[in-house]
């Protein structure tokens, strides 16, 4: 088995979390390298594309969260083998990534510009993407996004929904997902209660 190390910020969410969670669910050992915000500037230039997460495989470093998710998904049997199901899984992960990127662009705006940008996003792209993700979930049978079983796409959306509902994002109503895509909330709750996921966060909370 390859020697794996995931490097990402020290919080339970974001772009690095689906891969950490997938490795935990799959029972695959990895070095969980967590970076404090204050240590990021010194590390930034050492990452391939000036961003995290990164994954080291036997000493070689790669990046891009969804590429990492796919690789880890293959190692943990959380990625479809069937090409069509893999495409459905990828589409959902990339759609979730689009939203993270758009929100990311608002993080450093001034207060007024942030309010305007986020209100527009909430009414526009985020609503549209949530509705479409819900439609994708429904079309796939209602429980999982691809392959009728848990895949890394579910973990990626799980993080997005948790972030949007957390209240951490000013000007994006925390009940937006509940209002426009209730099936995504059911999906979130179903995942949160899966034994391995529930146990992981219980352990993280206690740490
Ligand atoms: N397309 C990249 C985006 C990576 C990204 O923007 N990561 C954020 C953290 S979630 C980051 O490193 N931000 C710090 C910075 O840009 O200085 C991916 O999917 O991994």
Image (spheres, helix red, strand yellow):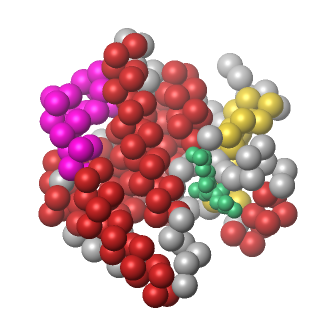
- In the displayed structure, would residue 89 be above or below residue 169? above
What residue lies at 83% left-to-right and 55% top-to-bottom? 45
Q: Quadrant of residue 174?
A: bottom left
Q: Is residue 141 magenta?
A: yes
Q: Please indicate whether residue 99 sits to the left or right of residue 12 in the image.
A: left
Q: Residue at x 37, y 12 (%)?
A: 82
Q: Position of residue 30 (x, y in %)?
A: 66, 37
Estimate the x, y position of residue 201 in percent, counting from the top left: 43, 54
Q: Using residue 192 as the reference point, say whether residue 108 is left or right of it.
A: right
Please state which of residues 32 and 44 is positioned toward the viewer in this rendering: 44
Picture quarter with the N terminus: top right
Q: Residue at x 75, y 64 (%)?
A: 40
- Identify which residue, 125 or 179, lies in the foreground: 125
Q: Is residue 76 left or right of residue 36?
A: left
From the viewer's side, name the closer residue of 69 and 134.
Answer: 134
Q: Is residue 103 magenta?
A: no
Judge whether 116 appears above or below 204 on screen: below
Number of residue marks: 0
Split into quadrants, the picture shows ligand 1 in the one at bottom right
Residue farthest bottom in this picture:
112
Where, quadrant-wise, is the C terminus in this rendering?
bottom right
Q: Nearer the viewer, residue 71 or 206?
A: 71
User: Is residue 204 visible to us here?
Assistant: no
Does the rendering let one see residue 56? yes
Part of the protein shown in magenta = 130-151
Q: Is residue 181 above or below residue 26?
A: below
x and y, in percent, of residue 3 in the image = 73, 28
Q: Which x, y percent locates residue 49? A: 74, 46
Task: Identify the residue shown where x is 29% and y is 62%.
Answer: 124
């Amino acid at each position: 088995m390859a020697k794996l190390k995931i490097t990402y910020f020290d919080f339970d969410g974001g772009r690095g979390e689906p891969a950490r969670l997938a490795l935990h669910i799959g029972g695959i050992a990895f070095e969980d390298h967590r970076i404090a915000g204050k240590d990021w500037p010194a590390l930034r230039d050492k990452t391939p594309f000036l961003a995290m997460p990164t994954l080291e495989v036997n000493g070689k470093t790669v990046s891009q969260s969804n590429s990492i998710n796919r690789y880890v998904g293959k190692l943990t049997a959380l990625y479809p083998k069937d090409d069509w199901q893999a495409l459905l899984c990828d589409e959902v992960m990339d759609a979730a990534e689009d939203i993270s990127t758009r929100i990311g662009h608002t993080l450093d705006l001034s207060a007024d510009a942030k309010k305007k940008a986020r209100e527009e996003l909430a009414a526009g792209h985020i609503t549209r993407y949530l509705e479409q993700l819900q439609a994708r979930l429904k079309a796939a049978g209602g429980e999982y996004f691809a392959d009728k079983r848990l895949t890394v796409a579910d973990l990626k959306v799980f993080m997005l929904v948790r972030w949007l509902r957390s209240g951490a994002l000013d000007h994006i109503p925390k009940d937006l997902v509940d209002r426009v895509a209730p099936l995504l909330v059911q999906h979130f709750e179903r995942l949160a209660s899966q034994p391995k996921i529930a146990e992981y966060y219980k352990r993280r909370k206690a740490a």
